[in-house]
């Protein structure tokens, strides 16, 4: 993988602290930098502050207050070519028009560390 394809940071958005921590650990062990958000508001703030450095967003589809779908729409409005992996325990995201956007893929929960890393590497063409 060339360094031009590797993101400086991956934004991880999930309201479950244990999953956020686990994903963070797996990604850091894989050599990625992470930014962590517990909700959509934090995610959008972090994205706005770090947009040039974010190469990928791992986004929970089921967030409280502002849903994953609403968050996805807001992120894609900020950068249409943003690469996003939706993390969901249900299949409803697979039929949603926003979730099937060209730069969006889906990772079904529960997932293994290997499945997470495969999804991330696939997004970056590695």
Image (tube, helix red, strand yellow):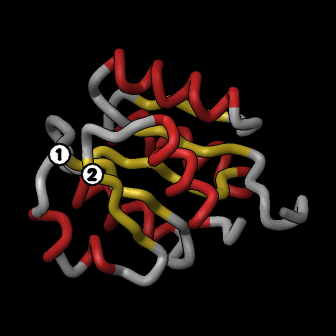
Q: Which residue is drawn at 18% across and 64% down?
A: 93
Residue tagged by mark 2?
A: 108
- Between residue 66 and residue 126, name the one nearer to us: 126
Label 2 or label 1, whichever comes before in sequence order? 1
Q: How crowded is mark 1: few (under 14 residues within 10 Å), some or many (20 or more)?
A: some
Q: In which quarter of the image is the C terminus?
A: bottom right
Q: Residue at x 45, y 47 (%)?
A: 115
Tags 2 and 1 in contact by the CB under 8 Å rule?
yes
Could you tell me how far apart the alpha carbons at marks 2 and 1 are, in whole angstroms? 6 Å
Identify the image quadrant of residue 42. top left
Q: Is residue 79 left or right of residue 17?
A: right
Residue tagged by mark 1?
A: 89
Compared to 111, does 52 lie above or below? below
Label 2 residue SS = strand
Identify the image quadrant of residue 79. bottom right
Label 1 residue SS = loop
Compared to 39, does 125 lie above or below? below
Compared to 53, does 72 lie above or below? below
Q: Which residue is drawn at 17% across and 45% down?
A: 89
Q: In this view, does 110 lie to the left or right of 33?
A: left
Q: Farthest right residue?
A: 3
Q: Which residue is drawn at 28% across and 23% down?
A: 16
Q: Residues within 10 Å of mark 2 (few under 14, many from 20)?
A: some
């Amino acid at each position: 993988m060339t360094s031009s394809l590797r993101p400086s940071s991956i934004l991880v958005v999930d309201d479950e602290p244990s999953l956020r921590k686990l994903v963070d650990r797996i990604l850091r062990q894989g050599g990625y930098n992470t930014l962590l958000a517990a909700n959509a508001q934090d995610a959008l703030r972090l994205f706005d502050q770090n947009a040039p450095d974010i190469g990928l967003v791992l986004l929970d589809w089921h967030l409280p207050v502002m849903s994953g779908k609403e968050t996805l729409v807001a992120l894609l409005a900020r950068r249409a070519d943003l690469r996003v992996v939706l993390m969901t325990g249900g299949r409803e995201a697979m039929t949603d028009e926003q979730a099937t956007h060209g730069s969006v893929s889906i990772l079904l929960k529960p997932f293994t560390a290997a499945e997470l890393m495969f999804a991330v590497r696939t997004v970056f063409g590695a």
